[in-house]
Image (tube, helix red, strand yellow):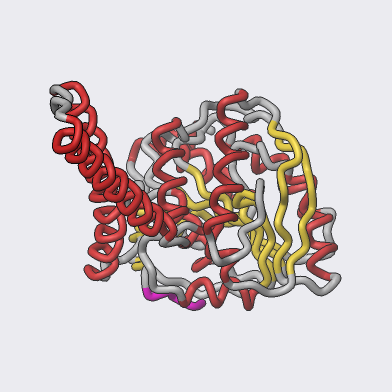
Amino acid sequence: MTTPPFGFTSKESNHNAVQLSIIIPFFNEREVLSLCHARLTPILNSLSESYEIVFVDDGSTDDSISILAAIIPTHPKTKVVRLSRNFGKEAAMSAGLAHATGAAIIVLDADLQDPPELIPKMVQAWRSGVDVVSMRRRRRHGEGWLKRFSAFSFYRILSGLSRSQIPSDTGDFRLMSRRVVDLLLLFPERCRYMKGLYAWVGFPTAILDYDRDPRAAGTTKWNYLALFGLALEGITSFSTAPLRWAAALGTIVALFGGFFGFWILLKTVLFGHDVPGYPSLMAMITLLSGIQLLTIGLLGEYAGKAYMESKQRPLYVVRDVIDMNTVGASDLSSADRANIVSL
């Protein structure tokens, strides 16, 4: 198994390679994990592909791990990569890619908004010769108009800004061949926007349209503030256009200020008009201050990324890997063990 330069695993184990790996990152999803596994396994069993299911626990604080640990003894093709704390979904997906052994890897959310019933079509497209199968959202059921509109706008803004062709309306639900995943594991960057990295590597890609379902259970962990942060991460990770926009805006304002000052000087010298009072002055100061703060913020965002990359810290730390061989010997708490017995 290839260990990426940006991750740290506390325990290593050898695994036999399979044809298909399903990566499911999650955080506090106890309401939906059993349903997800029960809905996924019959679909995978119907395929002629050997498979594994890799759940990635991104530092859950509920009893999610107990639910999965109770499933593993009767489903040996399932394992759980447990991170030492919550590192974020991008890091959790990277950890899943590092621990997947399949010739093809599919990323699937635990909330079942992305229907696992589409997996056979994805595998069929991969078998036809493509390296990436991207799933494009045709409709987003169960989401408000504001979220749909903001997602629609973001994908098109990002596509217009990025030099890489990032498909619009495609999330993390996709299939990737082993050579694509191996390339992703070589990327050393810590500030990661996975949707952009998927597109950056290139390779033949098929796009399948589908309708996204509402959550099967539980509540979303993505509020608007978190989504805004993810959008900012995506834009600043794959484009320097905001810096150019800030420079262009500064140039325009500077020219406007220069012409305005020259006009005031002409009126005062040639026509004897009084200089306008404080309201116009305060308006100009407020405008210029806002533009300066915005520009400083953009510079800070890019400088902060360089600072985080320079420290070379691991992107994630794996606490342990729970599978058929380790479920009895893993460092589960006594409360977790009691829950397993009761399930």
Relative vertical location of residue 334 with respect to residue 277 in this rendering, above or below = below
Tell me if 150 is positioned left or right of 232 in this view: right
Residue at figure coordinates x 67%, y 56% from the top left: 174
Quadrant in which residue 113 is drawn: top right
Relative vertical location of residue 104 with respect to residue 117 in this rendering, above or below = below
Residue 233 in magenta stretch: no
Between 106 and 65, the one nearer to me in the picture = 106
Quadrant in which residue 294 is drawn: top left
Tell me if 260 is positioned left or right of 16 in this view: left
Residue 131 screen position, x and y as percent: 72, 71
Residue at figure coordinates x 78%, y 63% from the top left: 206
Query: Which region is colored magenta?
Result: 1-5
Tell me if 337 is positioned left or right of 203 in this view: left
Type of secondary structure dominating the magenta stretch: loop
Residue 3 in magenta stretch: yes
Specify the quadrant that holds the C terminus.
top right
Quadrant in which residue 330 is drawn: bottom left
Total marks in image: 0
Residue 13 screen position, x and y as percent: 46, 72
Residue 275 screen position, x and y as percent: 14, 28
